[in-house]
Image: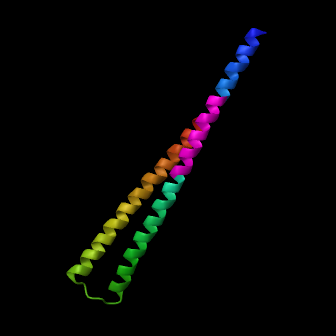
């Protein structure tokens, strides 16, 4: 009888530990998802900014040094936002893998 009670307590502790691990993993997945969504929105904004500059160029706006500099900066910003999005998506996928292990 005593062994059964101890076994039941050990099982209860094990279940509690697993529930805590799953809860933490779910929080990590949600946080990673939120970061990936924010990174995606930032990438969209950077792409829109570059597109606006490209439209101005296509309309025949003069290619002044300032304009070319702004376009190069916009391209750089888009590349940085794309990289950030990739890192965020990777973190999200890692979080899902950790959840599956929990």
Kindly report the secondary structure that dominates the magenta region of the rendered protein.
helix
Q: Position of residue 46 (x, y in %)?
A: 40, 70
Measuring 34% from the left and 66% from the top, which residue is drawn there? Answer: 77
Residue 49: x and y in percent read: 39, 75
Looking at the image, is 97 positioned above or below residue 13? below
Residue 33, image x and y in percent? 54, 53
Question: What is the quadrant of residue 100 in the picture?
Answer: top right
Left or right: 69 in relation to 89: left
Q: Which quarter of the figure is the C terminus placed in? A: top right
Judged from this view, the residue extending furthest toward the right is 1
Q: Which residues are magenta?
A: 16-32
- Front residue (pair 61, 36): 36
Q: Is residue 23 magenta?
A: yes
Kindly identify the residue that appears in the image at 52 percent across and 50 percent down.
31
Quadrant for the N terminus in the image? top right
The single residue placed furthest to the bottom in the displayed view is 60
């Amino acid at each position: 009888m005593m062994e059964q009670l101890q076994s039941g307590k050990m099982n209860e502790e094990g279940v509690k530990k697993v529930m805590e691990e799953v809860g933490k993993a779910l929080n990590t997945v949600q946080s990673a998802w939120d970061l990936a969504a924010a990174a995606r929105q930032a990438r969209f904004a950077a792409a829109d900014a570059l597109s606006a500059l490209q439209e101005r160029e296509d309309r025949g706006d003069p290619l002044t040094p300032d304009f070319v500099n702004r376009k190069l900066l916009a391209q750089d910003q888009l590349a940085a936002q794309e990289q950030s999005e990739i890192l965020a998506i990777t973190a999200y996928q890692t979080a899902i893998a950790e959840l599956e292990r929990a």
